[in-house]
Image (tube, helix red, strand yellow):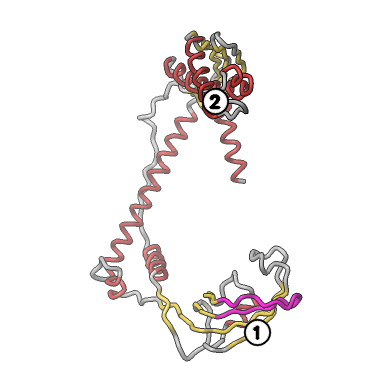
Amino acid sequence: MKSNIKILSGCKREIELDIEADEVTKEFERIVTQFSSRAKIPGFRPGKTPRDIIKQRFYPEIKESLFNSLIPKTLSEELKTQNLDPVGMPVVDDLHFKEGQPLHLKAQFEVWPEFNLPVYKKIKVKNKKVSVTDQEINQSLEELRLRSAQYMPVEGRGVREEDYVVAEMKGKDLKTKKFLPQEKVVILAGHAENEELLNKKLIGSMPGEEKKFTLDYDENHQNKKLAGKKIEHSLKVISIKEKKISALDDEFAKELGEFENLKDLKEKIKKEIISSKEKATKQDMAEEIIKKISNKLSIGLPEVLVEQEYMAIMRRL
């Protein structure tokens, strides 16, 4: 195989190569055989169609398969032989193929920029000491209490905000007079994503009590079955569960399974906060070192990297 590498600009390169005729012919004939075994040509049994007819009928597809089979693999192997690590896939911009002759092509690609790393062992950055306040520990404890909350059945009172309510809901389309299927639903009372009127009707409702209300749903409502419709709803509360948050004491710590008392729990939380802050501090220090090194470097970036970063930024906007 003959090949030649040209430097077009800072990071841009061009490779020109010829894939030997014997290798091209061997792969071409393999692909023709593959097409012949699959082709259904009137008057011929599968696999028995003359090769000239196969080539005439499927020549564009055979050529495309040949290029897809040979070019990426050959380019990758040759660039590896030349100790070149391309950024992205090489782009073929010149291709010449004729049966029985070498396959000639040119492709452009970009490489990582070469540079000398400046002396970095003497770069100084400030090592920040980490500390934990009682407020941070208490906040973590409160979050842990909320995550550990349980919902317990209640009786003898109506629905309050933040209760979980099991209810039966029915509905009727006031335009078509058609009834919607009855559903058993679980609702978090007072939740901001609920319809405002639903929250108003729900608060104070007792188990077994049924209330009716009408809602006009927006054309863009997320439930397509309700969008743009005026529905008369009937809601019947079946059961109510309220959030029970444990007291912040030794029993709460023991319930978590690995602590003897509240003091042990606080110590564990303190260590976790310190560990998290230390990791963040190390990350900040590493970024500061990299920034100081990069300020001393002057290199041209491959265009493909710049384009990829631009597209990534646009997707985040």
- The majority secondary structure of the magenta stretch comes to strand
Give yes or no for contact between labels 2 and 1 (Cβ–Cβ under 8 Å): no
Can residue 148 be seen in this snapshot?
Answer: yes
Residue situated furthest bottom in the rendering: 156
Q: Vertical placement of 263 versus 50: above or below? A: below
**In the foreground, 104 or 248:** 104
Image quarter for residue 90? top right
> What label does residue 35 carry, if any?
2
Q: Kindly identify the residue that appears in the image at 70 percent across and 63 percent down.
A: 220
Highlighted range, magenta: 168-183
Residue situated furthest left in the rendering: 260
Find numbered disc 2 in the image and state the secondary structure of the residue it sits on.
helix
Residue labelled with disc 1: 212
Q: Where's residue 180, x and y in %?
A: 65, 75
Can residue 90 be seen in this snapshot?
Answer: no
Residue situated furthest front in the rendering: 43
Look at label 1 and name its amino acid.
Lys
Mark 2 → mark 1, Cα distance in angstroms:
69 Å
Q: Where's residue 32, x and y in %?
A: 54, 21
Label 2 packing within 10 angstroms: few (<14), some (14-19), many (20+): many
